[in-house]
DNA sequence: TCTTGATTTGACCATCTGGTCAAAGTGAGG
DNA sequence: CCTCACTTTGACCAGATGGTCAAATCAAGA
């Protein structure tokens, strides 16, 4: 129940998770079918259900695995570091995640769009506590005159939204820009955006 | 085919569109059922299909109606106006739309998340042209020294993402903040964010 | 009131979907 | 090569789903 034993189990469970991520991130929980997930994973449907008891179980396992790592970039924002460097580093890590894990980002977005029925508690407990803790840090930086005055909660929201946009709305971004990889320019732009936002005015 | 004739047709078609918006914006095209839409609209399923030929037809009609008005705030950004005032006005209008039409925002987000199969052409033609046109305007403002140097495309992306975030990720925002209406604070924050981004440095 | 077109619905159908199950296949240690 | 646990699958099922249709109901003008 806890850890996969054989190599074949590891391989197939990983294939199912990957396929589920692929399908769920596009169509959401209700819009995805076991047949498509099984096909994508290269397994028959009964075989898939040999490894996971239900469609919901795959989806839940994916969400849990995702939540483990999703907040890591924010956790790493260090109260002892240089404020602007820390916040811009957070922006950079978040944008990098959008580039390297777009399916995870879309899975999360889909879950939230549908009202977050599976992770509502996680959001209103763990996430809320983490953001509150970081908001205090940001307010301290502001009080020390290290950054310009700012609403820390909405600052974090704007970091989330601007960075995740390049994963979740990738199709739109590429339609507007015309196919070129947008991430380098996005990185420069967001760096500038939050640097100008946070740099304290000269006295 | 073109215009509804009787009052009863207007009423029922409107009820179906509203119900479809409610359901599709939550569950996406594949995840929504005719039964739920019919129930939400207060009609029987065959009766619903008397007004629209198929589920896809409702979805498509919704998307088309949405696209008509969705870009209006950007269209209204006036090349002849005061640059910072125009851009901040655009931010304000976009955030207001997130507050007043969250279902439309989520419907759009869902369609994009799924790869925009129904509106890909619209994005890569009409939207692309509109953004390109406004990018030129922004670059002119920059050349005239009215705003700080900025990548106009990513500026627009960041306006879209930050404003739509309050509709699409409403559940998350409220989970983190704890139920208070976030829009007033969001408006102040975004005004500050883009004002600091765009205000030209003093020479 | 009668007629006629618009509206509504109960019953129905084919297909899809999540999930089950018994049986067959497979492979690694003895 | 035998065994036994692990793995895979074809056949199947019940319920959901998109959609059809003929019949019933309704509404408004003649």
Image: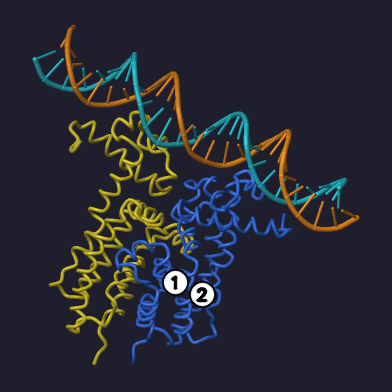
Chain colours: A blue, B yellow, C orange, D cyan
Query: In the rendered view, does B194 fall on the left or right side of A135?
Result: left
Q: Is residue B41 above or below residue A196?
A: above
Which chain does the numbered disc 1 sit on? A
Q: Is residue A103 above or below residue C1?
A: below
Which chain does the numbered disc 2 sit on? A
Query: In the rendered view, does A168 fall on the left or right side of B48?
Result: right
Of A81 and A133, the residue lying toward us? A81
Q: Is residue A51 above or below residue A11?
A: above
Q: Position of residue A109 (x, y in %)?
A: 45, 59
Q: Sequence-wise, which precedes: disc 2 or disc 1?
A: 2
Q: Quadrant of residue B156?
A: bottom left
SS state under label 1: helix
How many marks are shown on the rendered structure? 2
- Residue occupying image coordinates x 66% and y 50%: A51
- Residue occupying image coordinates x 35% and y 82%: A196
Tags 2 and 1 in contact by the CB under 8 Å rule? yes
Quarter of the image with the N terminus of chain B is top left
Q: Position of residue A67 (x, y in %)?
A: 56, 63
**Residue indicated by mark 2:** A134
SS state under label 2: helix
Q: Is residue A149 visible?
A: no
Q: Position of residue B93 (x, y in %)?
A: 25, 63
- Residue occupying image coordinates x 23% and y 92%: B203
Q: Is residue B45 above or below residue B125?
A: above
Q: Is residue B82 visible?
A: yes
Residue depth check, mark 2 versus mark 1: number of the one nearer the observer: 1
Of B35 and C1, the residue lying toward us? B35
**Residue indicated by mark 1:** A156
- Residue occupying image coordinates x 38% and y 72%: A181
Label 1 environment density (alpha carbons within 10 Å; few <14, some 14–19, many ≥20): some
Marks 2 and 1 sit apart, C-alpha to C-alpha, by 9 Å
């Amino acid at each position: 129940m806890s850890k996969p034993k054989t190599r074949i189990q590891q391989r197939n469970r990983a294939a199912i998770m990957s396929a589920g991520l692929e399908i769920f991130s596009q169509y959401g929980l209700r819009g995805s079918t076991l047949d498509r997930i099984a096909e994508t994973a290269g397994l028959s449907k009964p075989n898939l259900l040999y490894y996971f008891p239900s469609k919901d179980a795959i989806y839940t396992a994916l969400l849990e695995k995702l939540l483990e790592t999703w907040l890591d970039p924010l956790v790493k924002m260090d109260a002892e570091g240089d404020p602007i460097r820390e916040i811009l580093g957070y922006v950079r890590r978040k944008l990098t995640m959008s580039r390297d894990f777009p399916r995870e980002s879309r899975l999360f977005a889909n879950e939230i769009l549908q009202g977050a029925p599976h992770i509502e508690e996680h959001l209103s407990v763990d996430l809320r506590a983490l953001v509150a803790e970081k908001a205090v840090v940001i307010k301290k930086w502001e009080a020390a005159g290290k950054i310009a005055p700012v609403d820390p909660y909405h600052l974090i929201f704007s970091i989330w939204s601007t960075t995740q946009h390049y994963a979740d709305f990738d199709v739109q971004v590429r339609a507007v820009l015309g196919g070129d990889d947008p991430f380098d320019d996005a990185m420069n732009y967001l760096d500038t955006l939050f640097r100008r936002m946070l740099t304290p005015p000269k006295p």
